[in-house]
Image: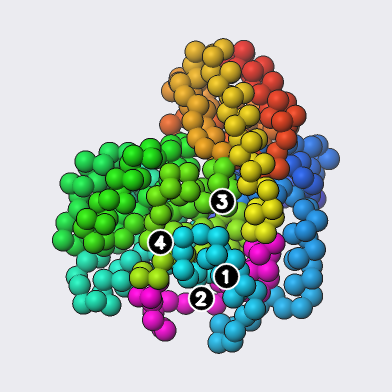
Amino acid sequence: MTVEQIKALDEQYYMHTFGARSPVSFTHGEGCTLYDTNGKAYTDFLAGIATNAFGYANPAIVKTISEQAAKLTHCSSLFYIEPQAKLAQLLVENSCADRAFFANSGAEANEGAIKLARRFFSSKGIDRYEIITMQNSFHGRTLATLAATGQEKYQKPFRPMPAGFVHAEYNDLADVKAKITDKTAAILCETVQGEGGVMPATPEFLQGLRQLCDANGILLIFDEVQTGLGRTGTLFGYQVSGVEPDIFTLAKALGGGLPMGAVLAKEPAASAFQPGDHGTTMGGNPLCCATAITVIQMLLDCQVEKGAQAGAYFKQKLEALKGQFSFIKDVRGQGLMLGMELDAAVPGKEIVAKALEKGFIINCAGHNTLRFVPPLIITQADIDALCDVLSAIFKDI
């Protein structure tokens, strides 16, 4: 089908949740390259929004999916599931967590973390249920995770929001402290705000959150849906600061492109869930878990370090562009999760469209920030090519 035919079907039959999309439809990919219906090649610096950590048609991932699909794709949680148990072991043995639970998405993982925090206190007969989250955050599109999200534009159409969420200023420890009450159960925070414009938390802020939680007997939750799994130059984002959460969530890259999320927790928090408290039909199915095992093993096999090196090189190149163009306000981020904030007068979305025309996929996040979250296998040659294109586009502004 042509992209025009696909667009016509979409407009007639699909709910208009995404509005007008970029006028491109991809047929296949290899490595960091995607190909559209006309055969045009694009270098992907978005990775399905930080999801395709190993790009496209990765031989190990394809092999795992094919072999597992030929054996068993789904099995009820009424029975023990070997890939599920092995994946839980792999994640626990390489993190600060003691137990894992698997879901289908980041929003579901965050819902699970919120439920676990509330259950931690209700199981003790303590009336603490409020979750402090950060302004400018993004935690998902279910009602609870929208309520947790600190951006009014996402909440307004669906009010009233579920109660029990309080928003504090990001990187402002005094404001977080002021929001803690005898009803506070947990603090939920991204180590780098992705949708909010690639805004890293300072190490001092994260260390302060840990101290506040310890002093007040509450739980610290990190949303690592976007920052986890090699994205920030370490296996998990919390390892950049060395601050360990009680609970953290994963999704995006975990399933190798398949729908997969996870809640990981230290034993004191994890033990709050008892049989019947939480569950899922599709989450943690054999196909997704087997694929996730392959993803984690590849990450542990030097790919995290390679991604960190590529991220350091990429950030230097973006900083060099900042030195050339005065309308670039900031370059920030960690590893291969980078953002370039532009002056408000600069049309960020137009730059994204022009880059697409030239065969490069990027996007624009909060604060008019160009966001770069490429596959972890991106090369220096790919980075050089993108920066040359950005330079040419910037010169025409």
Q: Please, what secondary structure does the residue beneath circle 2 have?
A: loop
How far is disc 4 from disc 1 in space, using C-alphas? 16 Å
Mark 1 or mark 2: whose residue is earlier in sequence = 1
Residue ranking furthest to the bottom: 78
Q: Is any atom of residue 118 visible in this view? A: yes
Res 206 → quadrant: top left
The disc placed on residue 190 is none
Residue drawn at point x = 40 percent, y = 50 percent = 243
Task: Say which of marks 3 and 4 sits in front.
Answer: 3
How far is disc 1 from disc 2 in space, using C-alphas? 19 Å
Q: Please, what secondary structure does the residue beneath circle 3 have?
A: loop
Amino acid carrying label 2: it is: Thr
Task: Say which of marks 2 and 3 sits in front.
Answer: 3
Q: Which residue is mark 2?
A: 280
The disc placed on residue 89 is 1
How far is disc 3 from disc 1 in space, using C-alphas? 15 Å
Amino acid carrying label 3: it is: Leu
State the image coordinates of residue 227 (x, y, percent, origin top left).
Answer: 51, 48
Q: Report whether 346 appears left or right of 336.
A: left
Q: Which residue is mark 3?
A: 235
How far is disc 2 from disc 3 in space, using C-alphas? 26 Å
